[in-house]
Image (spheres, rainbow, N blue to C red):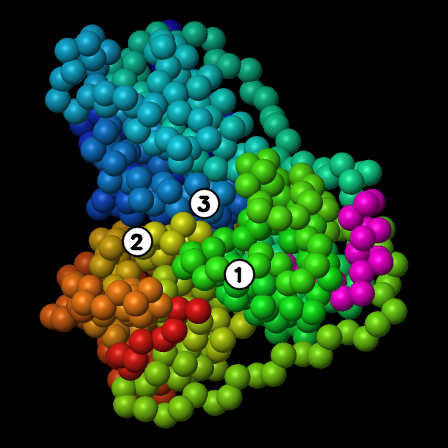
Amino acid sequence: MATVRDTTYDLLRDLGLQTVFGNPGSTEEPFLQDFPADFRYVHALQEASAVAMADGYAQATGRPAHVNLHTAPGTGNGMGNLVTAWHNRTPLIVTAGQQTREMLLIEPRLANLRATELTQPYVKWAHEPARAQDIPAAFLRAYATAVQPPAGPVFLSLPMDDWARPADPPPQRRTVATRVAPDPDRLRDFAAVLAGSRAPVLVLGAAVDRADAWPAAVALAERLAAPVWSAPAPERAVFPEDHPHFRGVLPYAIGPLAEALHGHDTVLVVGAPVFRYYPHVPGDYLPGDARLLHVTDDPDEAARAPVGESLLGDAGLTLATLGELLPAAGRAAPAARSAPPPPEVGDPPSADALFAALAAQWPADGVLVQESPSNLAALRRRLRVSRPRSYFTMASGGLGFGLPAAVGIALAERDSGRNRPVVAVIGDGSFHYSVQALWTAAQLRLPLPVLVPVNQQYAILKAFAELKHAPGVPALDLPGLDVTAIARGYGCASRVVESPDALGPALRAALAADRPTVLPAPISTDVPRII
């Protein structure tokens, strides 16, 4: 007779979930025992890294990923990056072992006392099956929940003694739709507003990239002769940044954002919140009497928008249909934005100088994973992303995602056969949040360059302290960290990039290597403005 474990593994095969990310614990061993030869276990040294690797892998493959955690402590370790997966809209199936059912009443060591509450509110669904025989059907429901819009992580708590029990007949395989078409009447109303607009502007969010909708976005922007902004703090690139209509990334504060949109009478926001703010800089939400039209596949996102009229729908389907409904605008296309001036020469170099050198050496089909908050403006200013699915970062604002996510993305590029080069830019503060991910990259022999701008400080926090007039904050400097020694200790190659001119040879060598290469690059300690 088939066991619950047998039936579950058969279902995981059917769902294409044969890669498991995790860090094994005692409560997971009954699930992992006699691990099938047609499955792969991606071993992370800590659960936060496992979650972010799975997130990156899922985003790069466009399919859900399975990450297996260790009861309550392991789930707690993974929570920071689970928050990021929630904001990234990543379909993750997160499972965690639970203590033996017969002992749960007496709360033994390593019991997850409130398993379904621990991960909330950062999962779409959390469940501990009432019977061992319900585990396969719970996996099927978890999968269906994770992929439906808005996509996101789900959580299953699975008692360790369930796996050997006799199984019920396997659940019937079923499929669910993953795209929501917009209401046609409401969409025609939006089209009428845009057609009558004097100066429309498009603001696009990460859902445009997730929907593979760059061509539809370009076509609509050109039809409207409208400039295009990225929504604030985007986790994905949303539009070809070398296109003449593209203006950049909107500031993530209320007053400055409205100022950036000055002169526009209609703001069409597609696939983004309205808006993602962080520092409170008060002002009007919109300039003057501008009208905002909002397209999202998330009812909660629509409900919490402080201004505008919302339409539920898939970003790609909506952009394509609007393009069909709208006549060509009878106005000139916006002028292209000017290129940034050459960076100033300094010793150590500025972040601008380092990233200008990176842009000059950037591979045509490169994928950028970044987590360098204080240097982000300089990076986006110098390196313009021109291809879909080529830029990834965290939507949550929490650190510790970028490095392990880059490992997952690089693994997905290899598994898919695309083999696009992946380059991570990770600040020296962020680097140490999930540094153990380097070991996994080395074990997988991934040719992953990790460029580390070294300014020996949490410069983003110094910038925020300046904005908020909060002097004297402790622990914002990072002396005594040897990035090269740490990288080599995890099995990576490493060489210091002493100047921007040295970056090109170092990057080429790293991309040709058979293991990850960490490239610390000293930069200026000047603190950039946060807005």
**What x and y, as percent, mark residue 22?**
29, 39
**What x and y, as percent, mark residue 322?**
79, 51
Q: Is residue 39 visible?
A: no
**Mark toward the viewer: 3 or 1:** 1
**What x and y, as percent, mark residue 202?**
68, 60
Tell whether position 202 is magenta.
yes
Q: Secondary structure at mark 1?
A: loop
Tell whether position 228 is magenta.
no
Return the disc, 2 or 1, that comes first in the chain's sequence.
Answer: 1
- Neighbour tally class for label 2: few under 14, some 14-19, many 20 plus, Cα within 10 Å: many
- Neighbour tally class for label 3: few under 14, some 14-19, many 20 plus, Cα within 10 Å: some
In the rendered structure, the answer to whether residue 224 lies left or right of residue 384 reads right
Q: Which residue is mark 1?
A: 283
Return the disc, 3 or 1, that comes first in the chain's sequence.
Answer: 3
Mark 3 vs 1: CB contact within 8 A: no
269, 10: nearer the viewer: 269
Name the residue type under label 1: Gly
Q: Quadrant of residue 300?
A: top right
Q: Which residue is mark 3?
A: 87
Q: What numbered label is drawn on residue 400?
A: 2
| Residue pictured at 80% horizontal, 60% vertical | 197
**What x and y, as percent, mark residue 359?**
47, 78
| Residue pictured at 36% horizontal, 88% vertical | 501
Q: Is residue 442 above or below residue 11?
A: below
